[in-house]
Image: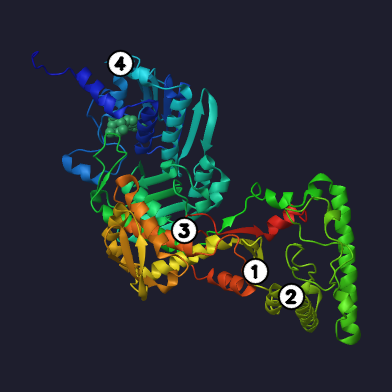
Amino acid sequence: MPDIQKLTPSVINKIAAGEVIERPSSVVKELMENAIDAGATRVDVSLAAGGTELVRVVDNGCGIVTDQLMLAVAPHATSKIREADDLFRVGTLGFRGEALASIAEVSRMVIRSRTSESAAGAELEISGGQLGPIAPCGCPNGTLIEVHNLFFNTPVRRKFLRATQTEMGHSTEAFTRLALAYPDRHFTLRHQEKLVYDLPPTDDWPARIAAFFGAELAGQLIRVESRDGPLKLTGYVANPSHSRANQKMQYLFLNGRAIRDRSLQHALGEAYRGLLLTGRYPVAFLEIEMPPEEVDVNVHPTKLEVRFQDGGRIYSQLLGTLRTRFLTTDLTARLQPAAASPIASADPTAAHDPDHAARLQSELVAWAKGQLGQAIGAVHGSGELSAAALAPPPLPIATPHPSHSSNLSHFPSPPADPFQLVAPPRPQQQPLELVRLDRSRFSAPQWNAVRSLQASHLAASAAATADGVAAHAAKSFHQRPAAIQVHDRYLVAETDEGVVVIDQHALHERVLYEEIREKVLAGALETQRLLVPEPVDLSPAESAAALSEKELLARLGVEIEPFGGGTLLVVGYPAMLSKLRPSELLRSLAAQLLEGGKTPERRDLLDDLLHMIACKAAIKAGDPLSPEEVAALVDQRHLAQDSHHCPHGRPTALVFTRDELDRQFKRT
Ligand code: ADP
Ligand code: MG
């Protein structure tokens, strides 16, 4: 064993530097933090080669008094705390007095600084920890620090630096965090002399967010705000449609310091549970303000992680605030213009031959006007509408149908029943509604007359076709139908805003999920004792796994007993789940329990079971629904807490706003 020796200060500093300064982005962070602590209202950052060749930070803060310049770069020298107790009331970003010393040890550093009291500035150069003389210099109030050739004297670390692009990515991220945390300061970022960001001060946080992540995201942010004693939570979370594949877009700030906190990220994930697909993460910009003595920021060399005195309280506050907020927020996915292309492509004639489309359109308009005139004339003339006035056109007017060929002449010639307003029996697949009259052109009594006439024609045509569908439709046509089912899988409804297309399976699944979950949580899911217990054959492992969750199953109203071998007896089963066979439920549960060998958290298991049950018990895409069923389902939409997403996080509905439709049809 060699002798034990005290390390030289230089080695100590290099070791410390290794902790604090990992790469150029660490320098960006430390220098920007110092500028903010110095009260700067403007901070200009310039980088060369992603920061590996140069990081320059210029601020207009308080500056450093000339005879303290040496101290600033000495290890463990700081103006920010005095005694150990101060560690628990840190109001600045820095306090360890390590950064400048560490950086100076592993780079060539230049500091130029001047306070408002002094007539001139002073300059100091340090190369690999070697201090040069202090020289007077002309400079504005504030501080300039340049860090050249980081790790030039520690080749091993230098080797770990990545391509310029990668380092630039990290450096930009460090810049982003600080610029997000202090929107009231002016920041600029230059790379290779080129301006990357110029962010004037603002009191509008979304404006600063938009500068980094675009106006589209910023426009979809949901404001959150809550207070629990001295604990204040403010900020923005994004609509679920703006989720990400990782947690990088979760910006958490604690008293102005960007932090990472697993527990708070978990709370975010919980709040969005069911709103996002698996593997997707919410976007959030949140600021937590709390008394500094309730948090320990001295647990991590770069202070990225902190320790809360009462982490559980912050966790619950975040989760509770978001949940409450989501209940009062419309999270329906808005169709973006790019995603709206299906509408456009449903009308290929318009895309391919605008002239032709325009001609067709004007013909239709002319025809419609004529019909309307006749209809109104008929009302005026006899007080009753003549049937002919409502006859569909000799021209085929049809809702554009994606599966139809683009050529309009391929549409069926005028339907056999001239008054047919609803779909005839399949498989002819004709348009759902051929005549749509402009309500605003009618007086109330006229409109009623029109509607009842339509209804009686419907009834007549329903009788003529043996198909019951039409009869249902006619009944519900007295009022406008709640929605129309298309392709046996989507429900289309008019809303105040425009048109909503609902995924029938996704919505029903969501409704069922919430209904069952509510009952389970309230302990109110009724079990039905089975007169004849139903045996379910499973493998011994599956059956043991299912039995191990006997109590959980009982909460779901599923009562099982062992019956020897792998067989289980189902003795009680909830009436609500009549669509789901007990064997299917038990097999899925067992598979889930055995999968991967890890024991899932109990809550997750219950939730997974609820998802599975809701999914299996819900109507499927492809199930034809009667108009009553359609109406009932659409009705329930308002009951679900989050009717906008199925439990897997897929949207249950898409809204095509009227504005969007007008735009697509070139009306605006
Ligand atoms: P810390 O920030 O933890 O105090 P640093 O090594 O980052 O440690 O800085 C040491 C000291 O140098 C600071 O406490 C501060 O007094 C001074 N200092 C550093 N940068 C600046 C700056 N941009 N403006 C004014 N003073 C500064
Ligand atoms: Mg510092």
Q: Amino acid at mark 2?
A: Ala
Q: Specify the quadrant of the image occupied by residue 535.
A: bottom left
Q: Specify the quadrant of the image occupied by residue 429.
A: bottom right
- Seen in the picture, residue 91 relative to 104 is either above or below; the reply is below
Q: Which mark is residue 647?
A: 3
Q: Disc 4 or disc 1, which is closer to the eye?
A: 1
Q: Residue at x 29, y 19 (%)?
A: 105
Cα–Cα span, label 3 and label 2: 39 Å
Q: What secondary structure is found at the residue carrying circle 2?
A: loop
- Categorize mark 2 by other alpha carbons within 10 Å: few (<14), some (14-19), many (20+): few
**Residue 635 drawn at (x, y percent):** 56, 72
Quadrant of the frame with the C terminus: bottom right
Q: Is residue 453 visible?
A: yes
Q: Is residue 165 left or right of residue 445?
A: left
Q: Which residue is mark 2?
A: 466
Q: Which residue is mark 1?
A: 483
Q: Amino acid at mark 1?
A: Ala
Q: Which residue is mark 4?
A: 128
- Seen in the picture, residue 522 relative to 205 is either above or below; the reply is below
Cα–Cα span, label 4 and label 1: 74 Å
Q: Residue at x 87, y 62 (%)?
A: 413
